[in-house]
Image (cartoon, rainbow, N blue to C red):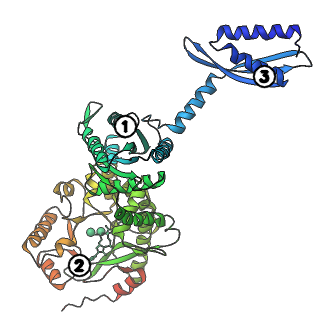
Amino acid sequence: MGFPQKAIEAKDLWIAVLLKKASIQRNYTQLHFNRALQQEGEASFEYELAMPYGMVYFEARISHLPDNKQILGIVRDITERHKSSEIIRQHAYFDTLTLLPNRFLALDRLSQMLNEAERNNECAAVFFIDLDDFKKVNDSLGHEVGDKLLIAAANRLNSAIRKEDTVGRLGGDEFIVLIRDIKSDHDASIIADALLNIFREPLRIDGRELILTLSIGISMYPQNGDNASELLRNSDIAMYQAKALGRNAYSFFTKEMNVTMLRRFEIEEQMHGALERNEFEVYYQPLLDVKTKKIIGAEALLRWHNHSLGHITPDEFIPIAEHTGLIIPIGQFVIQQALSFLTYWQQVTQNKYVMAVNLSPSQFRDKELFNFVKNILRDENLTANSLELEITEGVLMTGQSYIAETLMQFDLLGVKLSMDDFGTGYSSLSYLRQYAFDVLKIDRSFINGITLNDEDRNLVKAAIAMAHSLGLAVVAEGVEMHGQLLLLEELGCDFAQGFYFSKPVPAEQFITLSKNYKLDEP
Ligand code: C2E
Ligand code: CA
Ligand code: CA
């Protein structure tokens, strides 16, 4: 192949310039040139220059135009593009906050680890780690502190494992640790203990000392699964068990856990779309005046009937709805149903009643809660004091300011606030003083015992006296027997609710019940 003299000169000159400036090998450039010349077309390649201010990247396109006996070279600075693709790669594989491998990369490494373990006939362990009460920290101290805490936790986890093992962030406050070539469950428990141990030392964030604890779920290869998704799922299940043990603990996966968790997963799965499929229904249980034995209102209690799971009790599905966030639309459904039912009930009976609706802590995360309720009250033409919101101490213990603000807004609007399940938690007086409660609901576990033992009777008596001194009305829940009602009347309890009067029933049945209500007293 002969080159016209001019072209060869141009080519050599160009290579010389490149090589002088670039710290690249001559062969590399030469190779691309030759290729372009042979192909009689275009060849492109990238090269990098180490400049005093950092790396610079170029792309060279070389075209051989044989007809015109020319070589055309275009050199472009692609440093920016290079940076972006590096950023994209980082984004694709690494968590931007903690710089740990992200879920995608961590799961890829898990698969690699399993391949290797299979080849070498070794065991391996997957640790699913969740930071305890991280949400509380995040909500009370703010996201910035939360982020710093995540970074500090990631560093600490990283410092505790061997080089050949992996720590990844699965998302939120969930991490994964992959331990290769492990000899036994015992070895895994030593590592788990070590991880719990290194968190005993407080983390220092912005001059504050914060104690963070972990819940760890462990699944072992090959006993607990032979693929990445199974091992991940089983370690997740075991982590839930560690939480149930009271946190700051680890737990190995067992087959029995699968049964409880499968149900949990199934409930979670079925709950998506349950509202749209009209599977929820609000039942009503009457609230009675202890003195007059007349119905003064009702508590709205949610029921769920699902085609594949049957009836699921609220005690089982409400916590799951809170966990998934579905409690927000479901809770709105309850409020909407209960208040339009109240309007209807008042119209057909020409009476005024109060409707009690339960609110979960996570419903307060919905910034629209207050406006949502206010608009429905307006649309249904109801006075604010015909709605009573039942909350538990758990709501207040989180100490979040937006909860206090929302409660204050409700109070100013005239909505009544009721402290539910009193006696089961801390039963702190300060909450009753601090927030504008109107009603105290004594938990049914105490009502149960009032005719049987002195302790329960004394507690109920004290609670009534205290509530009255603070200007609160008292509701006794779970009244099942005439004797309990008599005693409650004697103790000065204001209202009562329970199977003795009626179980919670569907709307239509409730209307019939309330129209002809007459308590059969023995
Ligand atoms: P809760 O607020 O303490 O509701 C009272 C529970 O006691 C209801 O159970 C009711 O059926 C039951 N009950 C009433 N009288 C008696 C009685 O005399 N004896 C006995 N043994 N039980 C009685 P349910 O309907 O299964 O609800 C359980 C819990 O689920 C409720 O406890 C409440 O915390 C929650 N829940 C129910 N509906 C909703 C809702 O719409 N939203 C939210 N956030 N939570 C709800
Ligand atoms: Ca309640
Ligand atoms: Ca209750």
Asked if the residues shown at circle 1 and circle 3 are in contact, with their CB atoms under 8 angstroms apart, the answer is no
Residue placed at 26% from the left, 56% from the top? 245
The C terminus sits in image quarter: bottom left
Q: Which residue is mark 3?
A: 35
User: Which mark lies nearer to you, 3 or 2?
Assistant: 3
Q: Pick the residue in front: 513 or 343.
A: 513
Dot 1 or dot 2, earlier in sequence? 1
- Judged left or right of residue 324, residue 421 is left
Residue placed at 46% from the left, 45% from the top? 110
Q: Which residue is mark 2?
A: 289
User: Which mark lies nearer to you, 1 or 3?
Assistant: 3
The quarter of the displayed image where residue 409 is located: bottom left
Dot 1 or dot 3, earlier in sequence? 3
Q: CA distance from mark 1 to mark 2?
A: 57 Å
- Judged left or right of residue 82, residue 91 is left
User: Which mark lies nearer to you, 1 or 2?
Assistant: 1
Q: Which residue is mark 1?
A: 154
Q: Pick the residue in front: 237 or 470.
A: 237
Q: CA distance from mark 3 to mark 2?
A: 96 Å
* Residue ranking furthest to the left: 454
Identity, as a three-letter code, of the amino acid under mark 3: Arg
Identity, as a three-letter code, of the amino acid under mark 1: Ala
